[in-house]
Image (cartoon, rainbow, N blue to C red):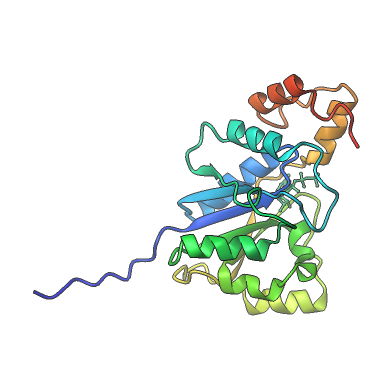
Amino acid sequence: MAKSVTNAVKEAIGILGGTFDPIHFGHLRSALDVLQQLDLQHIRLIPSARPPHRQQPLASPEQRLMMLHLAVKNNQQLVVDDRELARQGASYTVDTLLSLRQQFVDNPLYLLLGTDAFLHIQTWHRWTELLALAHIVVMQRPGEPLVMSEQLARWYQQHMGDNNDHSQVAGKIWPVVVTQLDISATAIREMVSQGKSPQFLLPDAVIQLIEQTDGYQNNG
Ligand code: ATP
């Protein structure tokens, strides 16, 4: 008997890396927007241990991980992934994608980046290898127009995805407009250190943990 051959595209997976110091509704709502617009099966939230391009987080890796778990506990499509915390040295995205590609060999992978992150992508370690491993989703963020260098604009245009064709597992760039939430972790840390409530900017359970641990009282 002839075997039936299916070429069905496997479930698509999103990847959102960040310091999440702390996680807030800007991250969570944007992730959900992308999940729904690109029909992803789930999104993995990956806290970075030692981000190479910025000031180190104030909260410990364990605290940031705990805040993430509390933030996503009511949504099964947002999954916390601690693989960067387990690794030594700087947290390079290319290494994270290599590790995810080993685990999800044939799944389309979508790396979610805010515009601020995308505009600096050419400074990232081995950035030219990223598209071989995953697609890139550019989340258009409030107040941050996509003003690209000539070289980045050329790369962006060359790899622009076609909305009618989601058959590839990597290699395309997809701009996605997300809900405009002008929330940043920096502003939340400042509020907490000044004794102001950050309520309605991030989940209550995360705020409770920050209060219990006196997090961000001493905002570096
Ligand atoms: P900080 O203020 O400490 O720099 P942040 O709020 O920008 O932190 P990160 O953890 O650095 O948060 O962000 C992780 C990713 O989420 C980045 O790609 C960033 O562009 C994106 N992001 C952060 N805030 C928002 C937001 N309000 N809307 C959409 N994307 C966001």
| Position of the C terminus by quadrant | top right
Instruction: Reply above or below: 164 against 38.
Output: below
Give percent across and percent down for residue 83: 60, 51
Task: Specify the farthest residue to the left.
Answer: 1
Instruction: Reply above or below: 174 against 177.
Output: below
Residue at image x 61%, y 33%?
71
Res 214 quadrant in image: top right
Work out whether residue 113 or residue 141 is closer to the camera in this orientation and state it: 113
Residue at image x 65%, y 80%?
158
Give percent across and percent down for residue 104: 46, 61
Q: How many marks?
A: 0
Instruction: Reply above or below: 34 against 199.
Output: below
Residue 24 seen in the current view = no
Viewed as shown, does residue 9 lie left or right of 22? left
| Position of the N terminus by quadrant | bottom left
Work out whether residue 124 or residue 152 is closer to the camera in this orientation and state it: 124
Give percent across and percent down for residue 107: 45, 63
Give percent across and percent down for residue 93: 67, 61
Residue at image x 69%, y 42%?
26
Instruction: Reply above or below: 71 against 144.
Output: above
Work out whether residue 176 or residue 65 is closer to the camera in this orientation and state it: 65
Residue 47 seen in the current view = yes
Viewed as shown, does residue 194 lie left or right of 22? right
Viewed as shown, does residue 138 lie left or right of 191? left
